[in-house]
Amino acid sequence: MATTGSHPAVKLKKLQLPPDTGHSGRRPSNPPSQPESTSTSGLLEPGAGFNAGRRRSTYRPGGNMNMVTATMALRRMTRNSIAQPQELPKPSVKYENTYRMEPEEGTVFLPSKAEKQISSLLEEHMKELTYDPATAGPLAETIAEAVKTKIKNLHCPRYKLVSTVMVGQCSGQGMEAASRCLWDDSKDNFATICHRNKSMFAVVTIFAAFFE
């Protein structure tokens, strides 16, 4: 028994250190009974220690820098690959029936206004045209679509429009055209106009049927 100081009751015990483990006397991070083992993907493997789930740096002094670059690229790709929320389609709007059997005041189809619009349109399209059998068909389709667009600007809602166009060469011939349809003459109407230049002529007819 050895004593220190002036008090004989204080005893010194020999400190027994564990074998040298290379950690300068610090306690190892993992108990020997549970060795740390992790896979390259960062997931725990069977038998991994309680500290195996801790995040560890991928950089090692003097290690392979390609591994560090690949890991950083994988993290960026994982962040960018998160699916963005998609916008839901807007529900379709359904309108109730108005039970209106006649056009409102000021929205009636007037043949006089329609003929004026069609006449100016034909002058614009056929001012310097020459008749060509190869382009007569596409020209008639273009005029028919332009006529419907022009009449829609007259603000006649709830009218269904049907446009017909006949294009021909001016060679002194005669031509007759006839049409027949079933409609209500108190609300439905039509307009027709004929325009010609030195080489060709066009006859345009547009029918406006009120949709109840």
Image (cartoon, rainbow, N blue to C red):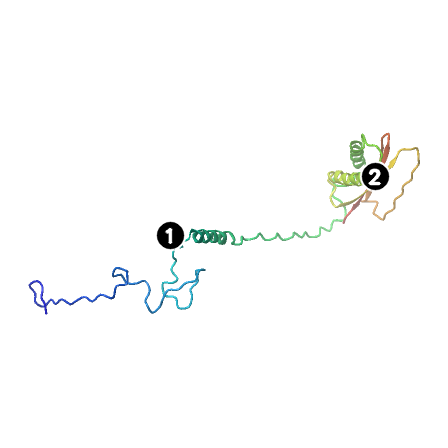
- The residue at the point 48 percent across, 52 percent down is 79
Residue 45 percent across, percent down from the top left:
42, 66
Q: Which dot marks residue 134? A: 2
Residue 166 percent across, percent down from the top left:
85, 39
Quadrant in which residue 174 is drawn: top right
- The residue at the point 25 percent across, 59 percent down is 24
As measured in the structure, the alpha-carbon distance from the residue carrying label 2 to the one carrying label 1 is 79 Å
- Is 156 positioned to the left or the right of 52 in the image? right
- The residue at the point 41 percent across, 63 percent down is 38
Name the amino acid type tagged 1: Gly
- The quarter of the picture where the N terminus appears is bottom left
Closest to the observer, 156 or 6: 6
Closest to the observer, 54 or 162: 54
Name the amino acid type tagged 2: Ala
Judged by depth in the image, the label closer to the viewer, 2 or 1, is 1
Q: Secondary structure at mark 2?
A: helix
Residue 185 percent across, percent down from the top left:
84, 45
- The residue at the point 38 percent across, 60 percent down is 54
Residue closest to the far left: 6
Q: Residues within 10 Å of mark 2 (few under 14, many from 20)?
A: few
Q: Secondary structure at mark 1?
A: loop
Q: Which dot marks residue 149? A: none
Q: Which dot marks residue 62? A: 1
- Above or below residue 103? Residue 122 is above
- Is 5 positioned to the left or the right of 158 in the image? left
Closest to the observer, 104 or 202: 202
The numbered mark, 2 or 1, whose residue comes first in the sequence reads 1
Residue 72 percent across, percent down from the top left:
45, 52
